[in-house]
Image: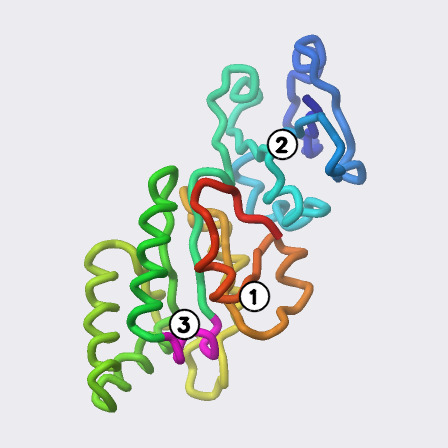
Amino acid sequence: MVVNILEISFLIFKKAQLEAEGHTAVQPSEFFLTEESSSSLLIILRNEDIAEHICEVPHLLKLKTSQGVQFAGIDEPDDVVNLTHQDLFKRGGFIMFHRAALEPLSLCNLKKMSAILQELSGTGKWKWIMHYGDSRRLKENARLSVEAKEKKHFLNFCQEAGLLEVLPYHECDLVSRDLPDYLTCLVRLQVQNISSRYPVFITDAAADSAFGKNGILTMTFQSFLTYSPSETFTA
């Protein structure tokens, strides 16, 4: 196994012990596993430094979607050798829709989406996160048609079931904004959601490359529907 240790001056890892167990230390510039590589990669970060450093990992999205890569969050150096570290990205995640992809969805498709989240939650907590403004728009539209009203009731059901989390009102929801700042929110939520750190952004438009650089997987809703919960999300 190949191991990287992000250097933090005041934290000394048991590098010699890891190497004695057959691990090889590598630098972040070497973080790229080819399809033919038989090595596995363990990337070690101190838990309190995740917010500042996680998006500095080269090829973050590629590494997160690779079967042979594990991200370990530690509090003490011994967490690595004692296997008491946190697995940062394999336990769960969350999805967020771009408004343009969310609003046209039928009730049937929303139910399909919730079923996939429930299947995913068999191996780790997965949820749907929505901005307050997007939630309000959907609920206000409930008076326009029978299906829109049913969609409102379904949103309420998802919240009660713990599948949907509506974010508190914040700057993204200001009436002066046309759309939320999805990238900033996804990066922040990736750090805050300790047990659900794998962000998936669903959009029908081409996403800015900054999403991938920050470890955020983007896909269309149709791609999400064809995802198999038995497999890891792939970029």
Reading the image, the residue beneath label 3 is 170
For the point 50% across and 19% down, which residue is it? 83
Horizontal relation, residue 165 to residue 190: left or right:
left
Rendered location of residue 201, percent (x, y): 51, 62
Tell me the quarter of the picture where residue 111 sits: bottom left
Residue 68, numbered circle = 2
Horizontal relation, residue 200 to residue 23: left or right:
left
- What kind of element bears circle 2? loop
Q: Which span is picked out in magenta? A: 98-105
Q: Nearer the viewer, residue 33 or 208?
A: 33
Question: Earlier along the polypeptide chain: callout 2 or callout 3?
Answer: 2
Measure the alpha-carbon separation of dots 1 and 2: 27 Å
Rendered location of residue 157, percent (x, y): 20, 63
Horizontal relation, residue 45 to residue 129: left or right:
right
Badge 1 amino acid = Leu
Rendered location of residue 85, percent (x, y): 49, 26
Question: Earlier along the polypeptide chain: callout 1 or callout 2?
Answer: 2
